[in-house]
Image (spheres, rainbow, N blue to C red):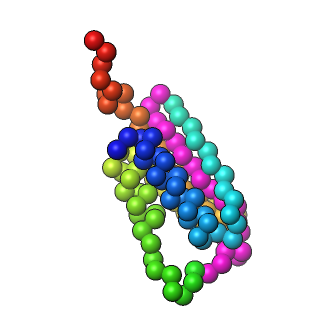
Amino acid sequence: MSPARTTSRILQEALTNVTKHAATCTARVRLAHTAHHLTLTVTNDTPTAGRPAAPATSKGGFGLLGMRERAAAVGGTFHAGHRPRGGFEVACALPLDSHDESPSP
């Protein structure tokens, strides 16, 4: 899977998690790139105390695990966790391999 496709799937899941688990429906998305890496960071600033509890009938999902596996599958790194002042952050860095492109004749 390409870094762009992997990034879009991780972004989709991270934003889904904000709507499911944060007390807010807003998030900050940062996408940056260099010649060698594509970096995605998704944060929300909801204080931990304001976070609603998951419903008792809610089944555990595989969102964070799936994001971690997607990043690893393309040789990238992944981090997710609570922020010191509240909220949550998902961050990944994915390599941009120029050798995936076919050389021009």
Where does the image place residue 20, in percent across and percent down from the top left? 59, 70
Where does the image place residue 71, in percent across and percent down from the top left? 40, 50
Number of numbered discs visible in the structure rendering: 0
**Camera sees residue 84:** no
Where does the image place residue 13, in percent across and percent down from the top left? 50, 59
The residue segment tinted magenta is: 35-53
Q: Of 70 and 37, which appears nearest the observer? A: 70
Which residue ends up furthest to the top in the rendered image? 105
- 71 vs 105: above or below: below
Does residue 12 appear left or right of residue 49 in this picture? left
- 56 vs 14: above or below: below
Which residue ends up furthest to the bottom in the rendered image? 56
Where does the image place residue 44, in percent across and percent down from the top left? 66, 59
The residue at the point 33 percent across, 26 percent down is 101
Q: Of 82 and 3, which appears nearest the observer? A: 3
The residue at the point 34 percent across, 44 percent down is 1
Does residue 28 appear left or right of residue 11 in this picture? right
The residue at the point 57 percent across, 58 percent down is 15
Residue 54, by quadrant, is: bottom right
Residue 68, by quadrant, is: bottom left
Image quarter where the C terminus lies is top left
The residue at the point 42 percent across, 41 percent down is 3
**Camera sees residue 28:** yes
